Amino acid sequence: MSKQQLISSFNLLESNINLLCQLLQAQKDINAAVFSLPETLKGDENNEINSIFVDKHTGHDAITQTIELFKLLFIHKKSELVSNKTAIRLPGAICLAPSYTEYKQFQQLISDINQLKIDIKQIVTHVDEAHRFEFIRESLHGLLTLNTYRTLTAVVDPDTIRFGWANKKVINKVTQEEMLNRLQASLESGRTPAHLQREHWQLQLETEIQLVRSLPHDCILKTQRPVKVQPIARVWDKETQKQTQYPCATPILVFAVDKALSDIKLGELADYHQDSIALRNRPKAKPVELLIPRLNLYIER
């Protein structure tokens, strides 16, 4: 994949996002509520989160905040004090009652934007991991990949939208060969983390390679990456008696087509308190042993 492909796709993405934002600003019939969360400062990325306090914004203030987030694609457009390692999240919903022509414009723009986001992610992730950072820096210096990749969610004529919080882990199985290839690639790349000396880093990688190589060939390896608490939206459709849960890092775009805006009920997002989250119907996990902490690599026992 070429740098020019990435730049061209990104320029088209920015253009479509600007058109979407112009269309949003032109809407008169709205019911909007978004919930801003505290920003994560540099150095605080790994701090344990026990509580999150939210601020509610409604109406055109919510539209303004949503547009700012949609357009936030580069590091230099946000405060230097805010971490670049954590995503900026703005849960909520923007309910709109556009004309039929405008609704079709919205649908086309959202579809085009999401496809471009997928295309950009594919262009970047097809680059070898060891060279990916340089590829992005040389093509689009300061790109916020989390914001760029994050697709938009749109729903039509729901009955209610409620908000809440979810804790989870991202668990992926990985083969012994895949892990060895990954470690070997890190060793051969020559790149060293800023806080480590080159000799220490090479020794650490060689030790990890030996550890993985010494495991039985039929071992079951997993990466279990903890994901910090995330805001979610639960969308209820009375006619189908179906509830759909969406991650809600950005506001959901809701269209009243056959319903009036007043028929669509928006809930609140309560402050998060770790002790108040109940665990429901969580399946019993197989016992695992931590092998390499920095990679969150475990082996089933």
Image (cartoon, rainbow, N blue to C red):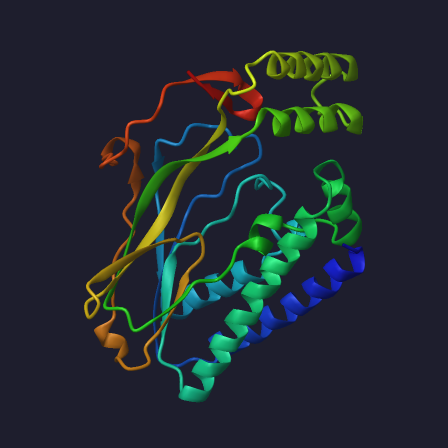
- The residue nearer to you, when weighing 55 against 255, is 255
Q: Give the residue displayed 57% in from the left and 65% down from the top.
A: 115
Q: Is residue 252 above or below residue 79?
A: below
Above or below, comparing residue 288 to residue 22 in the picture: above
Q: Position of residue 138 (x, y in %)?
A: 80, 49
- Residue 43: image location, x then y, percent: 56, 30
Q: Viewed as shown, does residue 186 lie left or right of 80? A: right
Specify the quadrant that holds the N terminus.
bottom right
Residue 235 point in image, percent of width and height: 28, 60
Q: Nearer the viewer, residue 295 or 93?
A: 295
**132 versus 245 height, above or below:** above
Q: Residue furthest front?
A: 218
Q: Nearer the viewer, residue 206 or 80?
A: 206
Residue ID at (41%, 15%): 301
Question: On the rendered structure, is 24 left or right of 7?
Answer: left
Place residue 116 in its image quadrant.
bottom right
- The tally of labels here is 0
Q: Quadrant of residue 169?
A: top left
Q: Residue 139 location, x and y as percent?
A: 78, 53
Indicate the quadrant where residue 168 lies.
top left
Residue at 26% over, 79% down: 259
